[in-house]
Image (tube, rainbow, N blue to C red):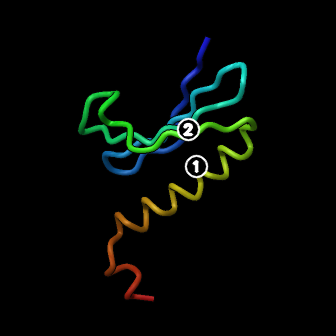
């Protein structure tokens, strides 16, 4: 049985973890599309700790992209 859990949501992009007996899958989905067509990134991890670390990195990247260049110019 697979268990799906949302890790973060930024705008129309959502990151989910799908747990299974052999590890976990990280998916980044664009909610403007169908479930299969909306998957923009899919990665498999044997350890959930590695998946959580990657999810945090992706969230920071998507948040920075969402803020745009004006936010990085202000610093």
Q: Residue at x 50, y 55 (%)?
A: 59
Q: Which residue is mark 1?
A: 55
| Quadrant of the image containing the C terminus | bottom left
Q: Which is nearer the eye, 27 or 16? A: 27
Provide residue 24's location: percent of width, then percent of height.
Answer: 65, 31
Q: Is residue 27 above or below residue 70?
A: above
Q: Quadrant of residue 45?
A: top right
Provide residue 26's location: percent of width, then percent of height.
Answer: 56, 38
Q: CA distance from mark 2 to mark 1?
A: 8 Å
Q: Quadrant of residue 66?
A: bottom left
Q: Is residue 9 above or below residue 5?
A: below
Provide residue 38's location: percent of width, then percent of height.
Answer: 32, 36
Q: Which residue is mark 2?
A: 26
**Which label's residue is closer to the chain start, 2 or 1?**
2
**Taking 17 as reference, is 40 left or right?**
left
Q: Residue at x 34, y 28 (%)?
A: 36
Find out whether the residues at labels 2 and 1 contact each other: C-beta distance under 8 Å. yes
**Taking 66 as reference, is 63 left or right?**
right
Q: Residue at x 38, y 37 (%)?
A: 39
| Quadrant of the image containing the N terminus | top right
Q: Which is nearer the eye, 40 or 9? A: 40
Q: Is residue 62 above or below residue 30?
A: below
Nearer the camera: disc 2 or disc 1: 2
Q: Which is nearer the eye, 14 or 39? A: 39
Q: Quadrant of residue 34?
A: top left
Q: Residue at x 37, y 66 (%)?
A: 65
**Taking 33 as reference, is 25 left or right?**
right
* Residue 20 marker: none
């Amino acid at each position: 049985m697979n268990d799906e859990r949302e890790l973060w949501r930024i705008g129309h992009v959502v990151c989910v973890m799908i747990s299974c007996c052999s590890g976990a899958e990280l998916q980044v989905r664009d909610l403007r599309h169908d479930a299969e067509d909306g998957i923009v990134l899919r990665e498999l991890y044997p350890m959930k700790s590695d998946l959580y670390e990657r999810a945090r990195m992706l969230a920071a990247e998507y948040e920075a992209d969402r803020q745009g260049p004006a936010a990085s110019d202000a610093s």
